[in-house]
Amino acid sequence: MTAIREKLSSLVPHRGKRDSHPGLLLQRYLHESATGDDGDPEQKRQILDAAINASANPEVRELYKIAYRRWKQEIDHKELTTSTVLQTPEKSRLIVGLGTENVLETGIRLHHTYGMPILPGSALKGLAAHYCDQVWGEQESKFKNDGEYHQLLFGTTDESGCIIFHDGWLTPDSPSPLKLDVMTPHHPKWLDGSEPPTDFDSPIPVPFLSVAGRFHVAVSWYGPASDKAVSWRDMAMTCLRDALFNWGIGGKTTSGYGVFDEEKWKAEEAKRQEEAEKKRVVAEKEAALAAMSPIERSIKEFLEGHPDKQAKESIKLLKELEKPAGRFQDAEDRKVVAARIKAAMQRDKEWKDKEPFGNRKNFIEQILGE
């Protein structure tokens, strides 16, 4: 027992231990029984604390960041794939794999290689399929288990569906994702079937690990390419999001575990769309500039940078042409500018011989050689 305590006490954050893998700690570092009548609960507590510390280890996090970046690049380059980032609420957590067979009595699903929490794609698909049947199916029978929409999205026992549900990866910016939690069964012997419940039973606290953080989830269309493929893909993502917002995933969902923060997602989605719109406008402007001739770009830059925002374009350009050392000195460039001024004056019904337009008209005609 002394040996394990010395080993576990060394696995604290920021020590750079190469063996600080949360999954290995939970699966391999228990030397003695930690559960049951002969178990030592303190050993279980130390194992859980060590796993929590290991999940904050800088070397572990850096390696995971590289793997996450590679996974995200692969997801981003897949055709007909959409993804989003969801976050657990500030005062809520999730636990996937709580009931899996485990020497610690409670389990948790971690990435086998990197030891970080993960949402299995199979669990996400099962959740979305059940939500589609139970909730969407109430409004439209085609979304029921035996409905054509449900079978197209999720498949049947004989055929696969057209949607791939990828594993949900924890984002590297999620600090200390593993949290120490506790449940308190009041009738443990009734739960294992050995004795009926009574008012004299003593509750036994059971520590376990839960998760808080941000998860990147993605779905892909995997059927024949068609014009409606994007719509089906987006429908599957909407169903999955709704299920995660309303039902939650993993264990203890009836106690509030496993749900994600819908309001925060909406706020982040609105911000993302706003930024995407800004990028689209900038890209359109850059494309328009690239398609312009050098003199057209020069005219645009001159007008956008002119200090007088109230004056008409034709007046700004005219005054610049009149300057002996103005911006437009090349003869061909001056003709292009003059033609633009002429078109503006004609549009505004100012192309006249009477003053104050006559002098302007004559000046422009001289440049154009008319």
Image (cartoon, rainbow, N blue to C red):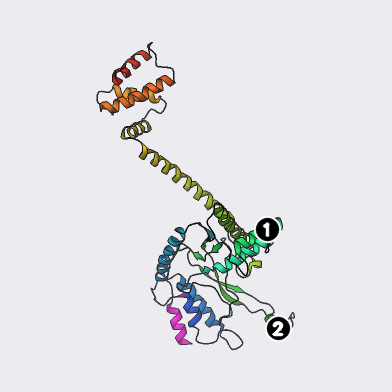
Instruction: From the image, state whether disc 2 or disc 1 is nearer to you.
Output: 1
Q: Give how far across and how far down residue 47 sits, in percent.
A: 50, 79
**Residue 176 or 341: which is nearer the viewer?**
341
Q: Is residue 93 above or below residue 270?
A: below
**Residue 136 or 51: which is nearer the viewer?**
136
Q: Give how far across and how far down residue 188 sits, in percent.
A: 67, 81
Quadrant of residue 212 within the rendered picture: bottom right
Q: Is residue 264 visible?
A: no
- How crowded pointer 2 is (Cα within 10 Å; few <14, some 14-19, many 20+) is rated as few
Mark 1 falls on what kind of element?
helix
Query: How many labels, in total?
Result: 2
Identified at 45% across, 58% down, the residue is: 76
Quadrant of residue 229 within the rendered picture: bottom right
Residue 246: assigned label:
none
What are the residue bounds of the magenta stretch?
Answer: 1-21
Q: Is residue 64 above or below residue 241?
A: below
User: Hey, what amino acid is under mark 2?
Assistant: Gly
Question: Is residue 192 shown left or right of residue 297?
Answer: right
Identified at 49% across, 87% down, the residue is: 1
Q: Give how far across and how far down residue 357 sits, in percent.
A: 38, 15
User: Hey, what amino acid is under mark 1?
Assistant: Lys
Q: Is residue 203 visible?
A: yes
Q: Based on the picture, tell me whether residue 9 belongs to the magenta stretch.
A: yes
Question: Is residue 186 shown left or right of residue 110?
Answer: right
| Residue hosting label 1 | 142
Q: Give how far across and how far down residue 351 sits, in percent.
A: 39, 16
| Residue hosting label 2 | 193
Q: Is residue 280 above or below residue 180?
A: above
**Residue 279 or 133: which is nearer the viewer?**
133
**Residue 234 or 221: which is nearer the viewer?**
221
Mark 2 falls on what kind of element?
loop
Question: Is residue 210 shown left or right of residue 285?
Answer: right
